[in-house]
Image: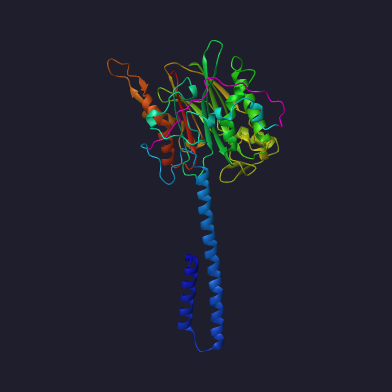
Amino acid sequence: MSPLEKSIKSIRNQIKNYNSDTINNNEDSYIIKGVSSDILVLVIIGILSVFFLGYYKYKNMVKDSTLNNSIYDTNFGDKSPTINDTECSPANNPPASFPPIRKKSNASLDPITWLGSVDESKLYSLNSTISDGSTKQLTLPMNQRELNPNFSHMKVGHWSDMGRRPYQEDRYNITKIGTLKDRTPISFYGVFDGHGGSEAAQYCADRLNLYLQNSTSFPDGDIALALNKTFLDVDEDFIATGKPDGATSCVCVVVGNEKIICANAGDSRAIIVKRDGSTVAMSVDHKPGLPSETKRITDLGGRVVYWGRWRVESVLAVSRAIGDAALMPYITAEPDIREHEVVAGEDLFLVVASDGIWDVMQNADVAKFIIEETCTTDDNNGGSGNKVVDLELLKWVGRKLCVEAGRLGSGDNTSVVVVVLNS
């Protein structure tokens, strides 16, 4: 006998016992009480049925979600991540040089088609030295993490965490993307926060750097212009796939040790952390309540409605993203672009992170946390007393920052990339 049947039988017996104790000899009264008992039993059966149906549906949903997300290396189940857990990277490295990319011949083609000879197994998210949540990673100790993943010319700490959600919609990409004519290296650091699914975020992580490399003004032309066109082209081609979700995208291109160009559409964020703990904002959060964004949307005929937070058409709490075809033209992929000349000896870190971090931490909080968790003082043997980045601690700092955001109450996926400048 199932638990539901046992519960129903027990309830029915209790009601009968109650009626037998209180019933009088009047037959009419007996009939009325009997009818009332049956109705009460039916009501209780209905309530229990709805409860058990909802419970089993939820249980199966969570089970399916867990199975679908079991590929994520950040899926710790009900156990909060601890710094003693192990994780990390596959041993196989990505190609040292990127294969040629065929130009688009027809916008209606599935975007993967025009990548031509690019082997799917060579795309970042499918064969990488780091984890972006899309592939099963080998479990290696944290101290074996690569500091220059995908040939990045800068040393990097990184992490992505599902947090309290049963799914992972964040992605990120770290890779070297080329050199200038004078052989100055150029690397790409991007964080992509999906909403309504992970398809758009995965699409960006797989392709955005390739679109940039394929731009006619990259690398020796105007990289800012190339980034702007890249965002719009990726948006157009993703929407052409017919998939409805979207992703905020924050990308920083670092040229040598001298220059950073940041392109941002959405509420992921990039900052420069200086040696004294101060910060320089490299992006602005595109929220519907931002006056300039509200004006842009309303001028196009859209609405910005407050429902728990400001939302575009009462739906989306960001005003710029790649994808979100149903909310065009109010949601745009047009990025804000900022450039920064790196100040040697002052600029210490570049931090790119999804809004799961920024929802609970201010720029200054993140700067202080990263400095405290990665830097030591060079005061031995006549040292200068300056802050020095401990590279072993750098391997952990992304993970520690995600854990700290969770401790502070973030319920979102969290992803962070910490780049050591002048490294």
Q: Quadrant of residue 220?
A: top right
Which is more toward the observer, 350 or 106?
106
Magenta stretch: dominant secondary structure: loop
User: Residue 101 colored magenta?
Assistant: yes
Percent of width and height locating residue 288: 60, 37
In the displayed structure, 15 sits above or below 383; it is below
Q: Which residue is pictured at 59% across the width and 25% down the height? A: 210
User: Residue 73 colored magenta?
Assistant: no
Percent of width and height locating residue 145: 41, 28
Q: How many marks?
A: 0
In the displayed structure, 35 sits above or below 304; it is below
Q: Quadrant of residue 262?
A: top right
The image's colour scheme reads rainbow
Q: Which residue is pictured at 51% across the width and 57% down the height? A: 55
Residue 421 visible? The answer is: yes
Percent of width and height locating residue 297: 66, 36
Where does the C terminus fall, quadrant-wise?
A: top left
Name the side, left or right, on which 364 lies relative to 203.
left
Furthest toward the top, the residue is 182
Which is more toward the observer, 172 or 322?
172
Q: Quadrant of residue 312?
A: top right
Percent of width and height locating residue 229: 64, 24
The magenta span reads 85-108
Name the side, left or right, on which 308 lies relative to 365.
right
Which is more toward the observer, 115 or 233?
115
Which is more toward the observer, 269 or 168?
168
Q: Which residue is pictured at 57% across the width and 21% down the height? A: 98
Furthest toward the left, the residue is 381
